[in-house]
Image (cartoon, grey):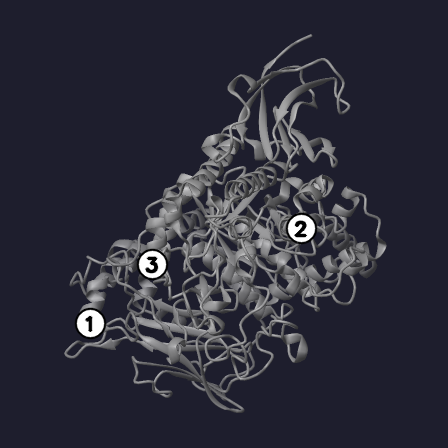
Amino acid sequence: MTSLSLNTKISLNPNNSALHFNAPNKLQHTNFPKKGKIKIKVTCSATDQPPQQQQQQTYSKKKRNASEGDKGIDPVGFLNKVGITHKPLAQFLRERHKELKNRKDEIFKRFLNLMEFSTGYEIVGMHRNVEHRMDFMDWAPGVRYCALVGDFNGWSPTENCAREGHLGHDDYGYWFIILEDKLREGEKPDELYFQQYNYVDDYDKGDSGVSIREIFNRANDEYWEPGEDRFVKNRFELPAKLYEQLFGPNGPQTLQELEEMPDAQTTYKAWKEQHKDDLPSNLPSYDVIDNGKDYDVFNVASDPRWQEKFRSKEPPIPYWLETRKGRKAWLKKYTPGIPHGSKYRVYFNTPDGPLERIPAWATYVQPDADGKEAFAIHWEPSPEFAYKWRNMRPKVPKSLRIYECHVGISGSEPKISSFNEFTEKVLPHVKEAGYNVIQLFGVVEHKDYFTVGYRVTNLYAVSSRYGTPDDFKHLVDEAHGLGLLVFLDIVHSYSAADQMVGLSQFDGSNDCYFHTGKRGFHKYWGTRMFKYGDLDVLHFLLSNLNWWVAEYQIDGFQFHSLSSMIYTHNGFASLTGDLEEYCNQYVDKDALLYLILANEILHALHPNIITIAEDATYYPGLCEPTTQGGLGFDYFLNLSASEMWLSFLENTPDHEWSMSKIVSTLVGNGQYSDKMIMHAENHNQSISGGRSFAEILFGEISEHSPDTNNLLLRGCSLHKMIRLITFTIGGHAYLNFMGNEFGHPKRVEFPMPSNNFSFSLANRHWDLLANRLHSNLFSFDQELMKLDENAKVLLRGSPSVHHVNDAKMVICYMRGPLVFIFNFHPTDSYEDYSVGVEEAGEYQIILNTDESKFGGQGLIKEHQYLQRTISKRVDGLRNCIEVPLPSRTAQVYKLSRILRI
């Protein structure tokens, strides 16, 4: 028996829930313990154990390894947690977990681990190689010929190409093209054919003037001890001596003269017998242990002193690094094969003829706007001009106050605003308003501006209409400097149907990135639907997520429109809420597996990342851990709240508002309230053909109307109350769309043919902050953010809603020491309204929507701000407070003093 001992620090088991990043051997799976010393027993003879015993041991090991791999994993864990006993859904989750394991096994056959699988941007796309060249790689399995065309080569389809049969692509359809840098006139080629250059760090190093041969000679003289470099200097001495020992000084010179050679074991025994009387100093430092058994592999034991000496010797890396030259030396000798700012496309020859496409992994793209042809732009600024990060990522706050914004419409002027304008004008406003997160949508490159950025064409590129990649880095960096996290609204649920600039029919076939037939198109929007079961599509999408984090330091993602990808009907079927609808034939299991992998990989590689699910169907387990059968998101959007408020404002008279419906909609499922992001209105209410709440409340008020003041008071009161109850009754996060915090009175309408491409509504009127009404609303929104900052309202446990009176239209609930009281009645006020409280003591108003500084009437006087409890059972509680409650107002009381009775 022989043994091999290795040290390890991480588990190589792909089913380990702790990491999931180390793949087993490509031929067979080997499960190792998580830490410590691994001992692999290698049996060299099949005669050592009986076959039956071997089979039993193999089975027991497989069973034990399987149980270790699934330790802590329960595919139906969250169903048991919430008490759901739906057998079809439980069976669906078990089958999905089994397919997830099979999917990972498929991945590990091609990739070392999930980290390599999800960081394809490191090799795919355009990259500078240290050996004075550019390497380009892209995936196009359906083409026969691939070339790069651009202004750097006169748009020639033959100058920079990779052809089939000429090492141009691998078995999976990845094409590889090398663009050699051009030698300047009068310069000689490098002496070392694999000469490397450091293009960034050693910019001022240049060429030291020391030749490669001088460095190698010095390495031989300084690194090797006397005698160690003998065979380095005389490469053929060792094989010549071995040949002479085997065949003598006059051995055979051709294969025909070579007689039958004895096997190694016979030769070794003869040599051993011949040298049995030699001194130990004349014997080699190696020997072969032979106990008389038939071995396939010998256990070779070495001299411990020689082995220790060999291991302690450091590799000659400093000498190798000394051969690397700096950027100045490279610029002196070469011109870039593709200069910075060059325009290029990829040229394909397909069975249906030639075509040109924008590379799928391109990081900077100019879409075909204004009738111009689309092209990618090579972005490789010199080190002195490349953007350098200055600020660290902020610590992730425990409660999220998210400011949702769109760069293009963020300016006051009727035009497309830029990253730099957003950085200069909007970021300070967000900080002043008290938010701690900005969430950007429409940043990823898209051809048509009127699509708001949701019909993405180039997933790895920031939109060039707003600026350069470095401009976006500057935006993120400045946001981090202000203590703001930056989230990105990512669209992986579908893609634009454009062919030239997008991914549709990228390689000439209809099934490259997307499904074929009807399933490959969204039923209502005409966008293309990704083929999530294809490993290369997964490779592309998962790498895209990590790209935004690694390249632009994005802190989180909101996954847009999950219902479009989870269901084959794209979420447009009438769902009744029956659990059968979440596990029937219309559910795309491959899409669910992608979401699970995305969350597992993101949270393993970036522990502080935040992922948000936007799913109108509230798929079961959205925010449950993947080890318990969930999808692994951190938060989900409560989309019902904004729909309810919009319905009330547009269709329901004020006196018919249902308090019970408000509470049930906003509280939702109490089990997941801590994972819920609340918003009164997001961009959908303003952009998707609708109106903002402010436009509904203030838009039809005439300045000369006799009832103007009352209408303004109504609108201002409801605007504040809706935000206060939505902010304080929900989960640990809140979202607001840009401009709504001060009651922006106009909707958003992007330029399109129907409005003659007008920009009049594609902006934000920041000058309204000087208006008294909008300034008051903004001041109240600031107080809301301070309420969370000071009283930690969002971090409190789930609200205790103990008073809901539909007749009087009053709602009261508690969160920790805070008591929230709302009177939605349009006309009725109450002098001494009794609501129950838990603690006896004094309660002080800390926020009142009716204060004059917030545009209210100031009906509650200063002496009424402090209320003392009465020992009277109300709402099932032992104590109560009797408070003044004007119509359409709300107050927040805080327990300021506890009275012990």
**Amino acid under label 2?**
Thr
Neighbour class for label 2 at 10 Å: few (<14), some, many (≥20)?
many
The residue positioned 37% from the left and 66% from the top of the image is 465
Q: Secondary structure at mark 2?
A: helix
Name the quarter where the C terminus is drawn. Answer: top right
Q: Which of marks 3 and 2 precedes in the sequence?
A: 3
Residue 84 is marked as: none
Q: Residue furthest front?
A: 706
Q: Which of marks 3 and 1 precedes in the sequence?
A: 1
The residue positioned 64% from the left and 72% from the top of the image is 524
**Mark 2 touching mark 3, by CB under 8 A?**
no
- Residue at mark 1: 333
**Mark 1 touching mark 3, by CB under 8 A?**
no
**Amino acid under label 3?**
Asp
**Cα separation between marks 2 and 3:** 36 Å
Q: As displayed, is residue 431 above or below residue 233? A: above
- Residue at mark 2: 626
240 sits to left or right of 851: left
**Mark 2 touching mark 1, by CB under 8 A?**
no
- Residue at mark 3: 470
**Amino acid under label 1?**
Lys
